[in-house]
Image (spheres, rainbow, N blue to C red):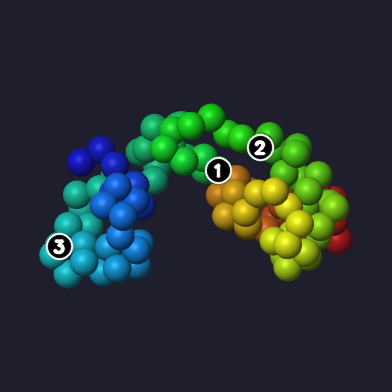
Amino acid sequence: MGYSRNSVAGFVKMDHSTFYKLCDERGLTGCFLPRKQLREGCKGGNLKGRARVYADDTILSWVRKHPSYKDFQAHAPMTYCTVQLRFGSFEKARQLAGVE
C-alpha cells in the first residue's frame, strides 16, 4: 500500500487502536509498510512528511528545563510523543540532555 497503519488510520479519521484491531480481524496487517521501509521524511517527530519543527538541541533544552514528565507536559511547547519519536523514550532524552 505504501503507507503505515498509523497514516491510514489518520486518513480515515479512525482511532488507531480500533483501526489496528479491524486490520488484524480482516487479515490486513501485511498490507502496510513497516516503519523501517517508510520514506525518511515520514519517520520520527514529524507528521505527513513535513519538515521537523524542533531541532534535537531545542528538544533537549526543554527536557533540561523540565526534566520530569509531568512538568514537561505542562510547560513544553511540544508533546511527549515528539520526544519519544525522536529519542526513543523520555528517559533516553533525559540522559542525552545530561539530566540525572
Residue 77 has which mark? Answer: none
Q: Is residue 74 visible?
A: yes
Q: Residues within 10 Å of mark 1 (few under 14, many from 20)?
A: many
Labels 2 & 1 near each other (Cβ < 8 A): yes
Would you say 97 lies left or right of 82 here?
A: right
Looking at marks 2 and 1 on the same chain, the residue that comes earlier in the sequence is marked by: 1
Q: Nearest the camera: 41 or 72? A: 72
Which residue appears at 48% of the width and 32% of the height? 50
Looking at marks 3 and 2 on the same chain, the residue that comes earlier in the sequence is marked by: 3
Q: Give the image location of residue 67, x and y in percent.
A: 81, 60
Report how many numbered discs are placed on residues in the image.
3
Q: Is residue 84 visible?
A: no
Please state which amino acid type lies under the numbered disc 1. Answer: Gly
Label 1 SS: loop
- Between the residue at mark 3 and the residue at mark 1, the CA separation in whole angstroms equals 29 Å
Q: Give the image location of residue 54, x and y in percent.
A: 66, 37
Residue 27 has which mark? Answer: 3
Q: Residues within 10 Å of mark 2 (few under 14, many from 20)?
A: some
Label 2 SS: loop
Looking at marks 3 and 1 on the same chain, the residue that comes earlier in the sequence is marked by: 3
Image quarter in which the N terminus is found: top left
Residue 54 has which mark? Answer: 2
Which residue appears at 21% of the width and 53% of the height? 30
The residue carrying mark 1 is 45
Please state which amino acid type lies under the numbered disc 3. Answer: Gly
Disc 3 versus disc 1: nearer the observer: 1
